[in-house]
Image: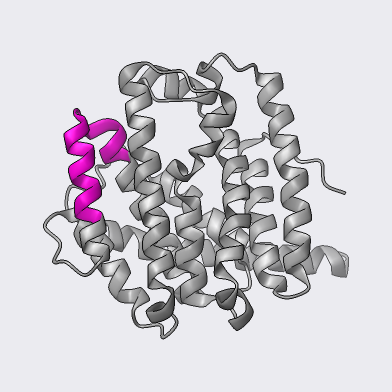
Amino acid sequence: MPDDELGEAYALGRTCALAAECGRDLRRCAQMYGGLFPAAAFRSDFFTALTLASAFSAPWAAADRLKILNRTALWVAALDRLVDHTATTREQVDRLTRECLSVADGAVPRSAITRFLADLRDELATVKAFHDLRGLWRDQLARTLAGMARAWVWRDSGALPTLDRFLENADSRGSCFVDVSHWIYTADDWARAHLDELRAVSGHVQRYLLLLGDVASYRRDVSWGDLNVLALGVSRGEVTAEMERLAREADALVGQIREHSPRTAAYLQRQMGFSAGFTGISGLRWS
């Protein structure tokens, strides 16, 4: 085997081992919050996909450095299920939002989803930077909750938002909240000092990932009655063109970060590339 192939195979093997170690942690984590992760909704392939995504987005990291990234992504998935498939009234959605924000502010949790959030909050508090960045973290949480509530209303009312309006609500996906949590926990000094700027770039990537995820899950979403961009009267060609535009713009934005924080830039770009490869759907046209 040529040296370059040997090195590539080694790197891939190490990354897969990292994903497997992260997966074991996530399964243990899920067991701690009884009823929040029913097996029918969170099958083994869900945990595999989640930890592969994080490992290939940051293959240089050790598993303990990816703990908040993975666990926050898991929490977002649980929250999304509660909003999309458990809540039957707007009041239930609003109450869940109030309880989560209250716990983010330090309140005692009263449910499995808020207990999980409190544990994330307390783990982040072990990092000195969280003291100064807690307000930004809380704000991004609020945006995620508001985005999910807005999507619930659209689905419940049968509303058909425009593509622009749909993308403006991309915080419903929650990946920006995951990124912010991850960077608070592990990022370098430059990234933490420029977290609000990074959040804007993460939000751009989030819009791409939202469209990518919707194209990949269209049939499932339609069968479950979930909101999906392709059910809004938008053609697949329009969505693909928008994904290509978002990818080009994200590439330019990430390029501005690279000279200051190479790994932060690599994380964002690899996140998009892995998701495109994993789903078999791209829209990527980078040089």
Q: Image quarter for residue 29?
A: bottom left
Which of 120 and 150 lies nearest the eye of the viewer? Answer: 150
Which of 110 and 93 lies nearest the eye of the viewer? Answer: 93
Q: Quadrant of the N terminus?
A: bottom right
What residue is shown at x 51% (from left), y 23% (from top)?
Answer: 218
Q: Which residues are magenta?
A: 81-100
Task: Name the dominant secondary structure of the magenta segment.
Answer: helix
Q: How many marks?
A: 0
Q: Is residue 85 above or below residue 157?
A: below
Q: Image quarter for residue 279?
A: top right
Residue 250 horizontal/vertical position (percent): 71, 50
Residue 38 horizontal/vertical position (percent): 24, 42
Which of 111 and 281 lies nearest the eye of the viewer? Answer: 111
Does residue 25 appear to the left or right of 65 in the view shown? left
Q: Is residue 132 above or below residue 161?
A: below
Does residue 284 appear to the left or right of 271 in the view shown? right
Q: Is residue 264 magenta?
A: no
What residue is shown at x 53% (from left), y 67% (from top)?
Answer: 18
Does residue 253 appear to the left or right of 189 in the view shown? right
Residue 228 horizontal/vertical position (percent): 48, 25
Question: Is residue 137 in view?
Answer: yes
What residue is shown at x 70% (from left), y 28% (from top)?
Answer: 240
Q: Is residue 94 magenta?
A: yes
Task: Report the colour scheme.
Answer: one colour
Residue 160 horizontal/vertical position (percent): 46, 18
User: Which residue appears farthest toward the bottom when viewing the image?
Assistant: 128
Does residue 153 appear to the left or right of 162 in the view shown? left
Question: Is residue 32 in view?
Answer: no
What residue is shown at x 40% (from left), y 82% (from top)?
Answer: 127
